Image: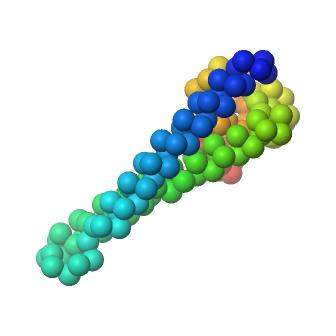
Amino acid sequence: MEKEKLRYNREKLLEMRRNLITKLNERYNEAMGLGGDGTQDSADEAYNLYNKNLMLGRVETDALKLRLIEQALQRIDAATYGVCIECEEDIEEKRLEYVPFARYCTDCKSELEKKGLIKM
Ligand SMILES: [Zn+2]
């Protein structure tokens, strides 16, 4: 990958990481603030519990994304960025434009997803 593009993707990843960390903190606090104070009736309680789980589910997805971003930044430092970690072919640049933290090329990704081995 060209140096210029690498630098651009690195900036993008750092920006994504900043935003995600902020979002994660907000969501987590929001989820933790819901329910459990014993002052609501049981319907409210159930509803809040539902929302809480929903939000924590999103936190989990974001946490996974954050981990992928961290790993992508490490691959940039190790000069292995943009290479599929499965087949070691170059990842399509178009794909990296949309998903700068991609670990797999499109083929490997759909193959692994079919087998249920990866979520993202
Ligand atoms: Zn591959």
Question: Quadrant of the rendered structure where residue 82 is?
Answer: top right
Q: Give the quadrant of the N terminus.
A: top right
Residue at position x 62%, y 30% in the image: 11
How many numbered circles does the render carry? 0
Describe residue 32's horizontal placement relative to residue 82 as left or right.
left
Describe residue 96's horizontal placement relative to residue 77 as left or right.
left
Query: Vertically, is 110 above or below 32?
Result: above
Q: Pick whichever, 90 or 15, lies toward us.
A: 15
Query: Vertically, is 20 above or below 9?
Result: below
Q: Pick whichever, 40 or 43, lies toward us.
A: 40
Q: Position of residue 47 (x, y in %)?
A: 23, 65
Q: Position of residue 63 (x, y in %)?
A: 54, 53
Q: Is residue 108 visible?
A: no
Question: Quadrant of the rendered structure where residue 34 is?
Answer: bottom left
Q: How is the image coloured?
A: rainbow
Q: Give the quadrant of the C terminus.
A: top right
Q: Position of residue 108 (x, y in %)?
A: 74, 36
Q: Pick whichever, 66 or 87, lies toward us.
A: 66
Q: Is residue 1 visible?
A: yes
Query: Vertically, is 89 above or below 33?
Result: above
Residue at position x 83%, y 34% in the image: 79
- Farthest bottom residue in view: 38
Q: Position of residue 43 (x, y in %)?
A: 17, 71
Residue at position x 79%, y 38% in the image: 77
Describe residue 105's horizontal placement relative to residue 67 as left or right.
right
